[in-house]
Image (cartoon, rainbow, N blue to C red):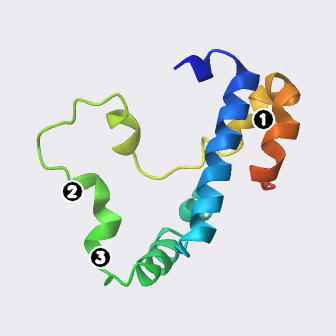
């Protein structure tokens, strides 16, 4: 948790983790599938079908009914409220609210950022 007490230290930690991940993917020739939330929200079925093809898995219509998959009991995790909601666009671009706080770390994060115009 010490890495998350300062925004610049957090950015450095994120950069280090991403460098290790990128190097590992190259060294072990492990394919990586990137799915952007913005694309998922815009076209859930198309994006999920592409992901399943990448994973060599079959499509099942119940995938789009993920909110009903959990049964009647509720999860006791902090993220339950978020993951039980339908896909939405409300969070897209929210990071921009913190752009001033992120200014000091942009040079560190830039290699990992692809800014989208949403």
Q: Earlier in the sequence, mark 2 or mark 3?
A: 3
Residue at 72 percent across and 32 percent down: it is: 11
Residue 101 position, x and y percent, is: 80, 22
Q: Which residue is found at the position 78% from the left and 35% from the top?
A: 96
Q: Nearer the viewer, residue 13 or 37?
A: 13
Q: What residue is disc 2 on?
A: 69
Q: Mark yes or no: residue 34 visible.
A: no
Image coordinates for residue 48, horizontal then vertical, percent: 45, 72
Whether residues under marks 2 and 1 lie with C-beta atoms below 8 angstroms apart, the answer is no
* Residue 82 in view in this figure: yes
| Residues at marks 2 and 3, CA–CA distance in whole angstroms | 12 Å
Label at residue 10: none
Residue sitting nearer the eye, 35 or 12: 12
> Is there CB contact under 8 Å for labels 2 and 3?
no
Residue for point 61% across, 23% down: 3
Marking on residue 61: 3
**C-alpha span from label 2 to label 1:** 33 Å
Find disc 1 in the rendering and name its residue. 96
Circle nearer the viewer, 3 or 1: 1
Q: Quadrant of residue 81?
A: top left
Check if mark 3's residue and mark 1's residue have beta carbons within 8 Å. no
Instruction: Kindly report the distance in space between the C-alpha atoms of the residues bearing marks 3 and 1.
Output: 35 Å
| SS under mark 1 | helix
Tell me the element at label 2: loop
């Amino acid at each position: 948790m010490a890495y998350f007490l300062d925004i610049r230290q957090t950015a450095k930690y994120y950069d280090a983790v991403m460098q290790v991940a990128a190097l590992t993917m190259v060294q072990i020739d492990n394919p990586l599938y990137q799915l952007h939330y913005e694309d998922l929200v815009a076209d859930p079925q198309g994006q999920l079908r592409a992901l399943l093809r990448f994973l060599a898995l079959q499509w099942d219509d119940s995938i789009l009914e993920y909110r009903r998959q959990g049964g009647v009991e509720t999860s006791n995790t902090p993220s339950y409220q978020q993951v039980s909601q339908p896909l939405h666009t409300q969070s897209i671009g929210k990071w921009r609210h913190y752009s001033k706080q992120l200014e000091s770390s942009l040079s560190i994060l830039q290699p990992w950022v692809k800014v989208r115009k949403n």
